[in-house]
Image (cartoon, rainbow, N blue to C red):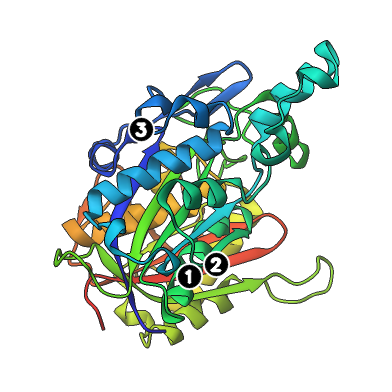
Amino acid sequence: MRPCAVTGIGVVAPNGIGHEAYWEQLLNGKSGIEPIPDGVAGVVSGFEAAQYMPAQLIVRTDRWTQLGLAATALALQDSGTDLAAVPEYEIAVVTGSSSGGNEFGQREIGKLWTAGPAGVSAYQSIAWFYAATTGQVSIRHGARGPCRVVVTEQASGLDALAQAGRVLQRGARVVLAGGTEAPLSPYALACQRVDGRISPHTDPERAFRPFDRHADGHVPGEGGAMFVVEDSPSTGRRPYGYLAGHAATFDPRPGSGGWPGLRRAIELALERAALTPADIDAVFADGAAVPELDQLEAAAIEAVFGPYSVPVTVPKTMVGRLYAGGGALDIATALLALRDGVIPPTTGAPDLPEHYRIELVLDRPRPAALRAVLVLARGRGGHNSAVVLTGEQR
């Protein structure tokens, strides 16, 4: 792959709006997970959509899209990139998506039953759609270049960044890329609970425990991140880092006896980045907090890097699993770690089983000379994605 630069970061997370606020909270171990009526979740508190978009756009969009529009505005402000100076057909948008506009849909279905078809908003036809955020970001910023959406659940934030790199290689100059999610409406939570992967715990400090011997599921959350991605920085500012390699694989059919695809994704991403396992200074793990999935991930990391040979962290313990926003937020976290030379911790004091032979960063941030890091994500249905980020262009 030809590396591309991330020049702007926009974060809307349960423990901070804006990448610096989020980063400060993360390094201080501050969680955004809090009680909700039916359990606990990572909730973006204090978000006011009107700060980022006009009122007429708010009534047309789901909270998921509003979070994406806000994150995009923050990323553009951070990068200093002047889109007015870029031809509109050379500005592209790629977002990751998962459950779509479920809150908007639930509200309008409620109106259908109480007020009849005439009470349903005409915008229901588009606000729920998985490509709605891509479309609204494109319209708002005059991006008429390639516009895409990747639907691979938690993996989609990583896949969206990789797609941004491919779009740049085909002639675009600026890509607005990333992912967000707002899956906390009652309908959305009911859908998520079907597979039993949400933790039943109601203690925000202990509910989400990836790689723990007592792990019993994840905590859902809302938010995510968007990025300004360029072939080379247009403002002369130092970029946060570079996308150096990516790979996506798919797990074999259950019961087929085939090997899970995460290890292969890691190996391919390293190969495409022209790096070896020894070049990776930290791994930002998927951390599903489901015992069988944690075991598979720990085994894949050990198989590629060796036992206890690379620091591993799951900072999403402070925000929850954000689905389409989770991979993007992990990328933002990894880029900030590269910038500041520090690995954020996995909170909650996980008690690792002995057969998870990984070096998990616990309790507090760890200073480190970071040159290249690996970000992993897995989506429901067998999606695996791995991204290699570097602090310098190779």
* Secondary structure category for the residue under label 3: loop
Q: Nearer the viewer, mark 1 or mark 3?
A: 1
Residue located 59% across and 31% down the image: 60
Position of residue 268 measured from the top left corner of the image (x, y, whole percent):
51, 82
Real-space CA distance between mark 2 and mark 3, rounded to the nearest whole angstrom = 25 Å
- Compared to residue 335, the image places residue 89 above or below, namely below
Q: Which residue is mark 1?
A: 162
Q: On the rendered structure, is 225 left or right of 344?
A: right
- Compared to residue 1, the image places residue 164 above or below, namely above
Q: In which quadrant is the N terminus drawn?
A: bottom left
Position of residue 241 measured from the top left corner of the image (x, y, whole percent):
27, 67
Q: Nearer the viewer, residue 177 or 250?
A: 177
Q: On the rendered structure, is 88 left or right of 96?
A: left
Q: Residue 161's quadrant in the figure?
A: bottom left
Question: Can residue 30 be seen from the camera position used here?
Answer: yes
Q: Which residue is mark 3?
A: 15
Local crowd size for mark 2, using a 10 Å CA cut-off: few (<14), some (14–19), many (≥20): many
Q: Which of marks 3 and 2 precedes in the sequence?
A: 3
* Secondary structure category for the residue under label 1: helix
Residue located 35% across and 85% down the image: 275
* Secondary structure category for the residue under label 2: strand
> Mark 2 belongs to which amino acid?
Ser
Q: Which residue is mark 2?
A: 385
Real-space CA distance between mark 2 and mark 1, rounded to the nearest whole angstrom = 10 Å
Position of residue 384 measured from the top left corner of the image (x, y, whole percent):
60, 66
Residue located 81% across and 19% down the image: 118
> Mark 3 belongs to which amino acid?
Asn
Q: In which quadrant is the C terminus drawn?
A: bottom left
> Mark 1 belongs to which amino acid?
Ala
